[in-house]
Amino acid sequence: MKQRCIKIARSSFFCASVLIISALVLCVGLVKTVRAEEIVCIPCHSGLPEKFSAPVKLWQKSIHAENGIACNACHGGDPKDAANAMSPARGFLGVPKPADIPAFCGRCHVGVLKNFLASAHGRALGKGGPTCVTCHGNHRVLKVTLDLINEKTCSQCHTFERARKIRDAMAQTEARIVAIDNRISEFKKTGTDTEIVEKQLFSLRNGLHSLSHVLEETKLTAASTQIDADLTKIESSLNDLTSIHKIRKIAGVIVVSAMLMTALLLHLMRKTY
Amino acid sequence: MEASRRTFLGTCLVAMAAVISAASAYPIWRYLAPRKINPADVKVGIPVKEVLEGEAKFFDYAGSPAVIVHKRGGGLEVFSAVCTHLGCIIQWEKEKQDFLCPCHGGRFSADGTVTGGPPPKPLNKLPFTVADGTITIG
């Protein structure tokens, strides 16, 4: 009997080990697949002197890297062919001149570019005014928070007073956006389908951030009112999800209790025979 | 005595089985049952004359932005105005006769197909009919 138990335990251990090893091999395989698709810019530039390798390290920490937006998305070129990666014939653009930076970034960030060009910052373009990288940095572009509007950055060119007003006009709405974003992240961890609310929130967040580039406090205040109303709708959807999760938890407890009770009843019934 | 005890336990077991069955069947029923608010049941009417040729009109459809486009040379199309990339609201570019997503530069033609940028799929078409000078969406 004892030997049989040992045999069963050994078999179980073997099966579990095979499953774990298979899972690990699968994971490594997936990682390898991603690495195999790496563009040629990264390995080449990583081995170059600091001036040329620093952008790689900075980019790796960026929101662009997080979302798979690699070097060629901005700088052009051929990321699959090391010999011709930086050939203008393959669409390589290189580093833009300061005055060309907004148009460079604006190829993707269309709405932001439009608002920026209409602003005091945009009107000062090429005359000592700021460009995208003045506030956002170049390669280490992070997910934007209100901390980006700070005295240290803004005071490079002017006093912080007006920038503070703009930041204050956005503060309340931004705080709600961040809170909702955190709630959505929590739901995602539980495997809940959050795609619709995520997209709705992204759209509102992007709308607010894009509008902030106009640098007009009144416009931001007016937009915040509309955005707040839409945020309330998202919060309502999330509250519904919370209610569903609560009901599921209660139902789970009931089912487990019922199963335990059934097991007990079966045990008692067996004793009656 | 044993028989009545057995009957009592049997009754309890049947009750437990009923509870477990109901708890198991409910999620399946919820999954298969129609949604309470079905967007297909929502109908929105817009007069044809409000959408001039070469122009687009945005409206709210089942709580989400939608757009009618009256293509140059004739023909109407109705879409969800939500970009299929990350959910921003698209804009109509009259000069180019296409849609632009202001967030990441996604472009869609007047018939909703992706012509540029990151959107992974075309705009979602909404069903509509035209009768008595009114476009009925839904």
Image: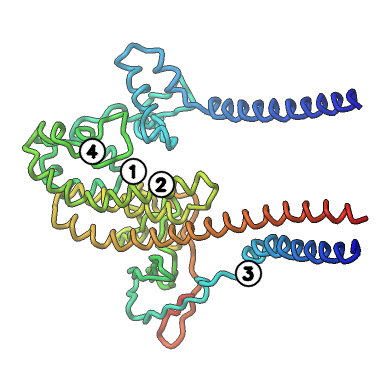
The residue depicted at 35 percent of the width and 34 percent of the height is A74
Residue type beneath disc 2: Gly
Number of the front mark, 3 or 2:
3
Front position in the image: B72 or A226: A226
Q: Residues within 10 Å of mark 1 (few under 14, many from 20)?
A: many
Residue beneath label 1, please?
A108
Whether residue A160 is situated above or below residue A191 in the rendered picture: above
The residue depicted at 39 percent of the width and 53 percent of the height is B107
Residues at marks 4 and 2, common chain?
no
Front position in the image: A236 or A207: A236
Q: Chain of mark 3?
A: B
Number of the front mark, 1 or 4:
4
Residues at marks 1 and 4, common chain?
yes
Left or right: B115 in relation to B7 = left
The residue depicted at 50 percent of the width and 26 percent of the height is A38
Q: Quadrant of residue A16?
A: top right
Residues at marks 1 and 3, common chain?
no
Q: Residues within 10 Å of mark 4 (few under 14, many from 20)?
A: few
Closer to the N terminus: mark 1 or mark 4? 1
Find the residue positioned furthest to the front.
Answer: B1
Closer to the N terminus: mark 3 or mark 2? 3
Q: Which mark is residue B33?
A: 3
Q: Chain of mark 4?
A: A
Q: Chain of mark 2?
A: B
Q: Gap between marks 1 and 2, in whole Å?
A: 8 Å
Q: Secondary structure at mark 3?
A: loop
Q: Secondary structure at mark 4?
A: helix
Residue beneath label 2, please?
B117
Residue beneath label 4, please?
A147
Residue type beneath disc 4: Asp
